[in-house]
Image (tube, rainbow, N blue to C red):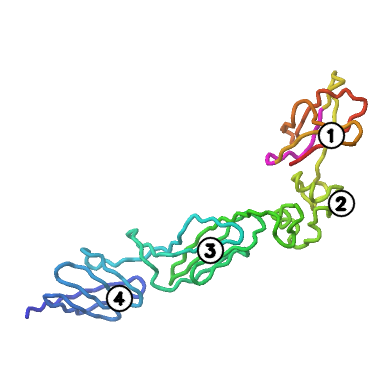
Amino acid sequence: MIRLICLISLTLPASAQELTHATLDSAGGRSTGGGITHDATLGGIGGEMHDAAPLAARPGFAGQLWDAVSLDITPQPAAMSDNSTLLLTAHLTGDDATTQPPSAPIAWESASLFLSVNATGQITTGTLPGDSTATVSARSGDLIGSAVISLSDQTPDDYDPFAGDNLDDAWQVLWFANDPDSGNPRRDPDADGQDNALEFLAGTTPLDGSSFLRVRIAPEPFQSTVRQLFFEPFRPDRTYRWEFSTTLQPAWQPVLGRPPDPQPDGEARATDEVATEVRKFYRLIIE
């Protein structure tokens, strides 16, 4: 029998174990050293190595081990809505960009109050108070991966204790999470004369008495039948229209003239080009 004696020294990043005095016959075979077992044949260099976690030698490259450099989560990007589920999976990515399943158990965690994740990677959302993002993380051994989940609130008026009051839940949570009673649409917690429903539409701060919708009317110089209509603040995500009545009774009619137009000073200006009535009342509709 022909016997080949070879000396192989391996240094592993995690355990620094050595395979010493490995002996292979002409057909190959198994050799051991320290905590490593090496199965190989002489027909080609390569095979598998095992210690506490699987390590694979790259065929054709003596002594080079597959080294995991990251733990990656799929699917990404991911999006969820109210009361839905999604299954995440994790895989190891090596320094050669190849992947394989994790060798150690996955520990999943969620950093969001509105999203939970179980031991299998299934995430579940509850009733959402608004659009947001949440981070889910996974750990396998010394590697940690994370995924950002976009949460979309498809029903913006169902979050307790603000559900069913015709006011956006996310806005109420922003200002009244610690005092839900003050978030009632008809309440005026800053005593500025404008309730929460109007403050929400106007884009003002419901807890600041100096922040409220301001409206004013001004004559147009040298044009007695023209009036300038001003308000602030102007929000680009709202639509505005002016209406008028001569008696404060229905039916209100649209103002004829230039529609609201934002100005550099923060106001928005509209024009009533037919202000010929002896008495005329205006109202601003915000949607």
The residue under label 3 is which amino acid type? Val
Mark 4 and mark 1 lie on one chain; the one further toward the N terminus is 4
Residue for point 10% across, 79% down:
3
Task: Please rate how many residues cluster around mark 3, counting C-alpha atoms within 10 Å: few if below 14, some from 14 to 19, many from 20.
Answer: many
Mark 2 and mark 4 lie on one chain; the one further toward the N terminus is 4
Q: Quadrant of the C terminus?
A: top right
Is 166 located above or below residue 38 in the figure?
Answer: above
Mark 1 and mark 3 lie on one chain; the one further toward the N terminus is 3
The residue furthest front is: 251
Is 277 located above or below residue 172 in the figure?
Answer: above
Image position, residue 36 (x, y; %): 28, 78
Residue for point 82% across, 47% down:
210
Label 4 secondary element: strand
Residue under pointer 4: 50
Residue under pointer 1: 252
Region of the chain picked out in magenta, as a range: 228-237
Q: Of residues 83 and 259, which is closer to you in this image?
A: 83
Mark 3 and mark 2 lie on one chain; the one further toward the N terminus is 3
Residue for point 70% across, 58% down:
158
Residue under pointer 3: 136
